[in-house]
Image (cartoon, helix red, strand yellow):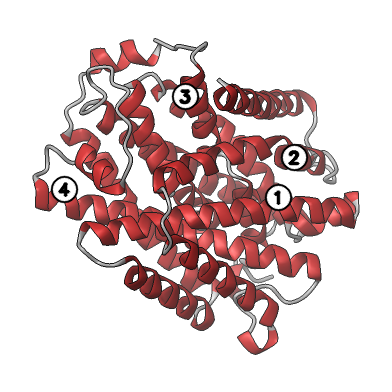
Amino acid sequence: MTDIVGKPPIKTNWGRLMAVAGPGIVVMLADTDAGSVITAAQSGAQWGYRLLLMQLLLVPILYIVQELTVRLGVVTGKGHAELISEHFGLIWAWVSVATLILACLGAILSELSGLAGVGALFGVPKLVTMSMAVCMLIVMAVTGSYLSVERIAIVVGAFELLFVYVAWKSQPAAAEMVKGMFDIPITNAKYLYLVSANIGAVIMPWMVFYQQSSVVEKGLTTEDLKAARWDTAIGALVTQLIMAAVLVATAATIGKAGGNAPLDTVEQIAGALTPFLGVATGKVIFALAISGSAIVATIVVTLTAARTIGEILRVPHTLETRPADAKWFYGAYALVLIVGAAIVCSDIDLVAVSVGVQVLNALLLPLVLGFLYLLARRLPEPFRLRGWYDVVVAVAMGATALFGVYSAISGLIG
């Protein structure tokens, strides 16, 4: 028996982790996308440290959700849309795919708007930034393999860790952080709106579809399940560390006085995140960090949309397939990018779109998490959800979905 990508079996746990790691880390780096960064920045600016505790509480929930996608992928060898079609029928599969495409289009607008905002920091017109981004991403997909694209995404996404450095340089007061974390204005509609946005910024529909299809495309099996779980756990910790860092940095600066100072442009967010670094250094560090988050998320979101369309149409939908043999896959990939770039080149409120997209994600959670849970309960033994962990998963996912919807609706009508 051979291992991943045709290599001999891997003997050590560390070696297996290195071979298996990728899908979880990539999807988690994409999770901290431009929209999530903006949402975290708004949270810190408007509410100080009052949403910091939520970033920590979402770590285990994020792991629980994404670990189920790993199980489904390695056990069945099928993508998420394909499994929904197989178990619940084609109509429900199309409903799920339709909501996914809506979330993907919203995310693409958020990511590309983030890149356009970075370009504006250096005086680069939107059209130039969008043209360069779209061309590079299409060339990467057409000429690359799954592993090459995965490695590019990890390297680019690693720049997000610069946000941790920014948070450290902002010199937050530990006592203020602890006090603020437990001062929760649960009845405030504006606070609830950002609660919903933060939930939607962490658990996104396209993450479920992407990680499951990626473990399938990478050829992972049940022997890789333990390592894939570690891949997912590490990613969950990293992404929430980055979200917390952005929130802390803005809370320690413009949110320190208890604020309610909204951030309306990428330039304003850059200014809020980098006051201790100097103008030039701060601008470069912010540009690298948010560009890394936006690019890796754009890769993940466009691949998710293209793969899922390919799954539901039952046509080739992997990066290992030549463009001539997978026209639907590469065509959908390019179309999503081009349409998103065209909309971004028009006048669009980046911050409003980004936060709104996260709220949309929260509203879609019942459908996405519901299918995920039901599919996990239909897995063969010993991989099926059962016993006490089944109860824990049901409670965690149900509470997250209901609270996400409740806070979204309360915030919208409040």
User: Which sits earlier in the primary sequence, circle 1 or circle 4?
Assistant: 1
Q: Is residue 347 left or right of residue 223?
A: left
User: Which sits earlier in the primary sequence, circle 1 or circle 3?
Assistant: 3
The residue beneath circle 1 is 99
Distance between the alpha carbons at the discs numbered 1 and 4: 38 Å
**Marks 2,1: beta carbons within 8 A:** yes
Q: Of the numbered discs in the image, which one, if any, rests on residue 367?
A: 2
Query: Dot 4 lies on which element?
Result: helix
The amino acid marked with disc number 2 is Leu
Residue shown at 21% from the left, 24% from the top: 172
When the figure is inspected, residue 63 is found, relative to residue 195, above or below; the finding is: below
Distance between the alpha carbons at the discs numbered 1 and 3: 26 Å
Distance between the alpha carbons at the discs numbered 4 and 2: 41 Å
Q: Quadrant location of residue 378?
A: top right
The amino acid marked with disc number 1 is Thr
Residue 21 in view, yes or no = no
When the figure is inspected, residue 178 is found, relative to residue 288, above or below; the finding is: above
Q: Of the numbered discs in the image, which one, if any, rests on residue 282?
A: 4
Q: Is residue 352 left or right of residue 177?
A: right
Residue most extreme to the bottom:
324
Q: Residue 73 placed where, x, y %?
A: 71, 55
Q: Of the numbered discs in the image, which one, if any, rests on residue 54?
A: 3
Query: Dot 2 lies on which element?
Result: helix
Distance between the alpha carbons at the discs numbered 2 and 1: 9 Å
Q: Residues within 10 Å of mark 1 (few under 14, many from 20)?
A: some
Query: Dot 3 lies on which element?
Result: helix
Q: Nearer the viewer, mark 3 or mark 4?
A: 4
